[in-house]
Image (cartoon, helix red, strand yellow):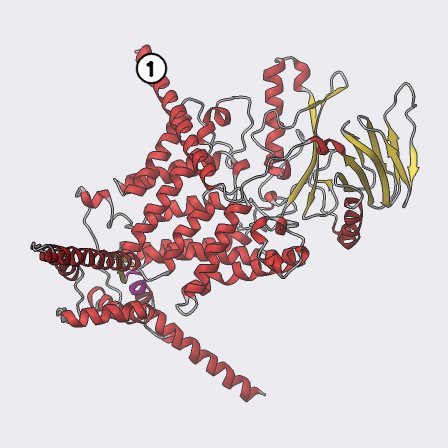
Amino acid sequence: MDVKLKLWLSSLYETTDTKFQEQFGFHIKEVTFERILAYLYAPKDSSSLAVTRILFGIAMLFDIPDERGGAIIDKRWGDPMVCHFPLVPFIKAVPMPYMAFVYAALWLGALGIALGYRYRFSAWLFTFCYWYLFLIEKSFWNNHSYLFGLVALLLACTEANCYWSLDVYLGYTKSKETVPYWNYFILKYQFFILYFMAGMKKGTAEWLTGYSVQNLSEHWVFNPFKLFLSTDQTDYLIVHWFVFVFDLTVAIWMMWSKTRHVAMVFCALFHLMNSRLFRIGMFPWVCLATMPLFYPFDWPKFITSYAKKQVSKVKGGICSYKHGQFVLSGKKIDCMSDELQDMEISDEKSEEWPEFDEDNEKIDENDVISEGIERKNNSDDKEKDFQQKSNSEYERKNISEDGHDWKDGRKNLTFLLIALHVLLQAFLPYSHFITKGYNNWTNGLYGYSWDMMVHTWDLESVIVKVVDNTNHEEFYVDPYIYTPNDRWTRHGDMVYQYVRCLKGNLIEHIGTSNRYFNISIYIDVWCSMNGRFTQRMFDAKVDLLNATWSPFQPVSYLMPLLDEALGWRTVLQDIRTEVHSWSNYSDVVFVADFPGYDQEKYIPPELTNISMTVLNGNVAYQPEATKFLNAQSYRLTKGNRIKIGPGTFHKVINIGETTAFYMYTFANNSQAFEVSQPKPKLPIGQELLRRLVNMVKFASIVGTNIFQVFFQFKFCN
């Protein structure tokens, strides 16, 4: 057994070593710092990097008015009463109209990236402005916002402007046919992390058992799968298991030449489907734009060369046809001018891209053509040979006899920065044991962990209660009156920031009376994660103004996730199916609560046939006191049901020693009068029009605010 194991390990090592040598140009035993540096600085064609720069810049031009809020700057940043949620307390938003300058600089930076104009300045301008917006408002964070900031940062460090850019055309920088390989490596690694970590985060019981994303297969994009699978099977096999395997392995398949084309097709379809399924802005389009990074580096030149040849053939065919027509008519035409022009183009191309052997001797023209054809048929093998030559050339030119004398010390620093970024991006998604203050049923700051679609939330209610401790009075505040969205309701750090902002707004709005310096604020958030019971997220008995929070300590006022309810999932699904069969407008909500806690709930008047049923535990039901009904309590145990009238309040108190589980069934007959307009499946024209309209709004708001600042400045002078 030991002998067989040794033979298997030896064979595995030899296979790995062979693949390693093919990729890097040297064996595993020969790994040294010098060889790694030579690999990272091997020259690669610059055209693919230029295309990535252009497409990313264009995508950001459309992203700024939409997801960055450029078309609603005045609403997002113009109201001083709106609560914001910065990551670092001392980095705050500048007031309007000066925020318009930040957005203007951001948009001009994206334009400079796309055009390659004053590229270094434009790229760093965009990067700084983007990360500034990112840091001053956590409530808009998501994974792809984080990705855009990283890509901008990485592009700003590369030589992406040395080809197909205004900088080259205007002479601000020299045109370069090649760039160091690390320019590509760092971007490819970033997208490898994007896919791979998204797959790793889906390797949980919640995802693999099919509960993370429910009913997604009802969308029309899954219709082809439903030809041979049921809706439930599509949700489980395609949405959960296929996507898990896809995210985990797609980057590997795209890097391997034998599977690259098939992987690209699946990856393109995946991102196109996401663009229809979710409102995630430019994320699918940025991913589509960066997919060609995994192809050979000179693919744009190959395409342009192929296109020129096809145009030349068409022109030649047209010219030959015209020549024949003129001959029949007794006239003559000279077609050689076009043909000579095509030949000159071809000759210029061969002179512009000379290939040299190791002795720097020019290769014969016929060899160049044959090698070019072979390169297109087997580009990866050609790339491996070129890599080995580049490594040996680098070592011969830049390494002294002792192997430690470097001509350019900046290369060592570049290597260290690349290594730091590689390690940091691999570590951050699993760094939640350090930043415990951001763990709220999910781990960490949502936005850098690549937890994409791992958790879905159904927010039931948010209750904000303010207690005047001086006069012993209490009142309720609309939870959304001072906030830009509801993301803050599910994160302990943002809840902590919200209550302090709310206190400041109350003092500012109502006055500086001493009574509002002695208040308490309680927040009760009810939500369901991944189809579980709806439960409270934060302790409604804790005065959050007196609570403490630290990024390195667990959230003290966070209620635990009721994992004991997991065994109910099959039962809940059966009940939900039965309730939905009653009518097209019947529905059910499942609730779980902790011992000693109570829930006060209001039933909207548009609901009918409302009843509450206890599934497990002991609760006390207390209806609202009216002139027809005294405020009395009813003890309910497992299986008991009680009718509830619409438009009334009631309270449910868990009087047992264990968690109480109960449900509300109701019918919303108001939906019967709602006329839903059919939505187009591919509203491409509408989406493009909306983006263009937002661009115009963005330009108008920015221009107006900048003019206002300059007018005030001139008037004051």
The image quarter containing residue 522 is: top right
Whether residue 40 is in magenta: the answer is yes
- In depth, the one of 673 and 126 nearer the eye is 673
Is 316 left, or right, of 24 in this rendering? left
The image quarter containing residue 312 is: bottom left
Is 709 left, or right, of 301 in this rendering? right
Q: Secondary structure at mark 1?
A: helix
Height in image: 233 above or below 283?
below
Quadrant occupied by the N terminus: bottom right
Q: Looking at the magenta stretch, what is its main secondary structure?
A: helix
- In depth, the one of 160 and 86 nearer the eye is 160
For disc 1, the marked residue is 711
- In depth, the one of 251 and 360 nearer the eye is 251
Height in image: 475 above or below 454?
above
Whether residue 110 is in magenta: the answer is no
Q: In the image, residue 31 lies at what x, y percent? A: 36, 71
Q: What's the magenta region?
A: 37-41
The image quarter containing residue 118 is: top left
Residue 593 appears in the picture as rendered: no
Q: In the image, residue 329 lies at what x, y percent? A: 11, 54
Residue 334 appears in the picture as rendered: yes
* In the image, farthest residue toward the front: 329
Disc 1 marks a residue whose amino acid type is: Phe
Quadrant occupied by the C terminus: top left
Q: Mark 1: give few (<14), some (14-19) or many (20+) Cα within 10 Å.
A: few
Is 646 left, or right, of 688 in this rendering? right
Q: In the image, residue 408 lies at what x, y percent? A: 23, 56
- In depth, the one of 419 and 142 nearer the eye is 142
Q: How many marks?
A: 1
Q: In the image, residue 691 lies at what x, y percent? A: 43, 35
**Residue at (22% x, 72% y) in the render:** 370
